[in-house]
Image (cartoon, grey):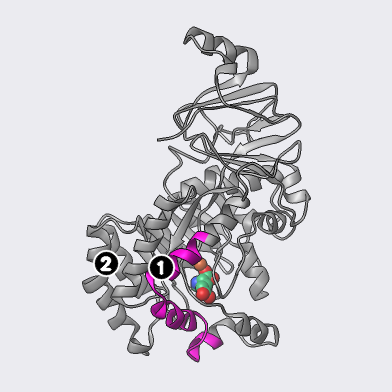
Amino acid sequence: MGADLIIENAAEIVTCAPRAGEARPGVLTGASLVIEQGRITHLGPAERVAAELAAKGRTPASFPRLDAAGKAVLPGFIDAHTHLVFAGDRVDEFSRRLAGEGYLEILRHGGGILSTVRATRRASREELLRLGRKRLDAMLAHGVTTVEAKSGYGLDRDTEIRQLEVACELGCLHPVEVVPTFLGAHAVPEEYRGRPSAYIDFLIAAVLPEVAARGLARFCDVFCETGVFSPAEARRLLRAAADLGLGLKIHADEMSPLGGAELAAELGAVSADHLLHVSPAGIAALARAGVVAVLLPMTAFSLREPYAPARAILEAGGTVALATDFNPGSCYSESIPLLSALGAVALGLSAEEIVAALTIHAAAALGIAGTVGSLEVGKQGDLVVLDAPSYRHLPYRLGVNLVETVVKRGEIVCDKRNPGGTAC
Ligand code: NIG
Ligand code: FE
């Protein structure tokens, strides 16, 4: 699986390869990049790459060629936190929130996540597939080559499993790779109203084992929040998930400082996400335990909440990834450009930190930094070409999608250069 390709003449190739003590994301000029059967096999000065190919009896001209003159080439973006599979929308709720109603207040009254649960339970597998496909197309057009997809709009056995099956199938049907996460503990369903602990028991007994046995999810996540699931309930579920071999994630300290970050550190979660209200102790714990902080500034923007303390997390030695949180309630957007702009303007991240947060650190948040997230020999040939000469244009061009071409495993899967190309 995978194609061959050579990329030549790029104004810069931004490798995002992790380099100790270096703030710059690894910028190569005058370089070529070769992909064979979907994997990067050569990367470096154009003459050196040509010599390496000659030693194998090949020439640059023998490869399909992408001329990136005047453009920046980056690793494909990785959106490490999305709620991809759902039906319906919540446009009315958006108006209500703008008029002053609170997000958790709406949920308490049976709306919010629970209204998407009703719509998703009613939707057929085919409908969920159709919707998911369309969303992946839009994500791909923003340069996303890998996306995490959470369940959590079923809150019953059948619909949770259906959401995960759809996520897995989408990953097979579509060039964008899908990493599924079980988020059965996204809210307390109507059937268990007032009995969150009993619902956790149900998930542990009746859903989690099947999810794990069938390999339907790589991670288990939980919405640890006042009025949703307490840290004790989250701990119980996540321990059961870890025992079954799933990696762990937490929606942590989003609306209140409940200690979700500390819990993520205690359990060795791969990431703690949101963190708008993370405590200083939580920040220190994340850094100590090597838990990736997945920050979702578009959600803070949409909910008109304060932003996560990105600089404090970095200063404490933590790792920051950025993700969209694409979902129908708190953030109905797949916009990497808006995310990058908020990363800079609202979180105070540099262009270098933003690029790393969308690539190698996002890969770390999904436990796949060994195969994707940077441009290095041996890694998957997933990359984007920007219609701009430098990665520094990414946050600078506020809200503008600069992605011109997207390559997945060496294949051009989105090409906006000519109308006859692979449109997306
Ligand atoms: O990450 N906070 C909980 N879950 C989502 C929102 C889901 C929804 O509102 O439908 C989030 O913000
Ligand atoms: Fe989320």
Query: Does the magenta segment cover residue 402?
Result: no
Three-letter amino acid code of the residue under disc 1: Glu
Q: Is residue 78 above or below residue 165?
A: above
Q: Residue at x 72, y 56 (%)?
A: 341
Q: Position of residue 35 (x, y in %)?
A: 51, 27
Q: Position of residue 411 (x, y in %)?
A: 52, 36
Q: Residue at x 73, y 50 (%)?
A: 395
Left or right, residue 119 beside residue 205: right
**Res 83 seen here:** no
Name the one closer to the observer, 358 or 50.
50
Q: Is residue 350 above or below residue 138?
A: above
- Mark 1 residue's CB less than 8 Å from ligand 1: no
Distance of mark 1 from mark 2, alpha carbons? 24 Å
Three-letter amino acid code of the residue under disc 2: Leu
> For the residue carrying disc 2, how many other residues have a C-alpha within 10 Å: few (<14), some (14-19), or many (20+)?
many
Q: Is residue 80 above or below residue 91?
A: above
* Disc marking residue 126: 1
Residue 72 lies in quadrant: top right
Q: Residue at x 70, y 87 (%)?
A: 99
Q: Quarter holding the N terminus?
A: top left
Region in magenta: 105-133
Of marks 1 and 2, the one in the foreground: 1
